[in-house]
């Protein structure tokens, strides 16, 4: 995968996560802490620090080196305004991965996620040779469901108590996109 930044929308670019992103990622999470809280696992205060993000990045880059994950960041100028990650990459007859993403509160509704997912799906198919990408959203996360629908994902079911989000086990709607 190329480490070069690619334009996602007019002023937003996407590139692979780098070890040097800890400070900027920390700043992005601090700025969006309340915005993201209803959609993410409860986070310890350490997560929002540069040291906490260095640990997260180190883990993600190790998983990337092992072929199990591909993390990207979304940038406006040099500011991180979101992230999108293929996780749980499985080879063999499955050739599948999960996609997760978030966008800065000030960049919602601007097509950033839709464009980023389109780029990630192309990389999943063309560069990773995957057959399928899955996503999961909270039932009441209408904007995320619309993003997935626009990207050609189809709803495949409901997973009760799927993930512990905002401190409680919550149902998620499952989606998939077949890439062939």
Image: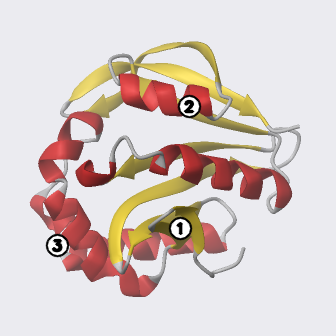
Give the SS element for disc 2.
Answer: helix
As measured in the structure, the alpha-carbon distance from the residue carrying label 1 to the one carrying label 2 is 18 Å
Label drawn at residue 148: 2
**In the image, is 71 to the left or to the right of 26?**
right
Q: Which residue lies at the image location 58% right of the left edge and 77% below the top edge?
A: 5
As measured in the structure, the alpha-carbon distance from the residue carrying label 3 to the one carrying label 2 is 30 Å
**In the image, is 73 to the left or to the right of 94?**
left
Locate residue 142, reporting x and y percent: 38, 22
Q: Which residue lies at the image location 29% right of the left edge and 41% below the top edge?
A: 40
Label drawn at residue 49: 3
Locate residue 141, reporting x and y percent: 35, 24
- In front: 137, or 12? 12
Locate residue 10, reporting x and y percent: 49, 63
Please give the count of numbered marks on the rendered protein: 3
Residue with the mark numbered 1: 14
Which quadrant, please, contains the N terminus? bottom right
**In the image, is 169 to the left or to the right of 151?**
left
Give the SS element for disc 1.
Answer: strand
The color scheme shown is: secondary structure
- In front: 111, or 142? 111
Q: Is residue 166 above or below residue 118?
A: above
- In front: 124, or 167? 124
| Label 2 CA crowd tier, 10 Å (few <14, some 14–19, many 20+) | many
Q: Is residue 90 above or below residue 55?
A: above
- State which mark lies toward you, 1 or 3: 1
Marks 1/3 in contact by CB < 8 Å: the verdict is no
Locate residue 61, reporting x and y percent: 53, 74
The mark that comes first in sequence, 3 or 2, is 3
As measured in the structure, the alpha-carbon distance from the residue carrying label 1 to the one carrying label 3 is 22 Å
The mark that comes first in sequence, 1 or 3, is 1
């Amino acid at each position: 995968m190329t480490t070069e930044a690619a334009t996602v929308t007019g002023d937003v670019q996407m590139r692979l996560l780098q070890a040097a992103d800890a400070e900027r990622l920390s700043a992005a999470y601090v700025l969006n802490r309340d915005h993201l809280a209803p959609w993410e696992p409860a986070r310890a205060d350490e997560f929002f620090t540069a040291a906490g993000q260095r640990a997260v990045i180190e883990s993600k880059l190790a998983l990337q080196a092992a072929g199990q994950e591909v993390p990207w960041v979304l940038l406006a100028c040099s500011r991180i305004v979101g992230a999108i990650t293929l996780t749980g990459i499985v080879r063999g007859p499955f050739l599948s991965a999960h996609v997760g993403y978030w966008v800065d509160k000030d960049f919602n509704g601007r097509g950033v996620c839709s464009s980023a997912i389109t780029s990630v799906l192309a990389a999943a198919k063309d560069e990773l040779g995957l057959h399928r990408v899955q996503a999961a959203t909270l039932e009441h996360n209408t904007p995320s469901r619309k993003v997935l629908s626009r990207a050609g994902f189809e709803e495949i079911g409901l997973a009760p108590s799927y993930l512990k989000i905002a401190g409680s086990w919550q149902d998620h709607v499952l989606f998939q996109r077949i890439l062939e």
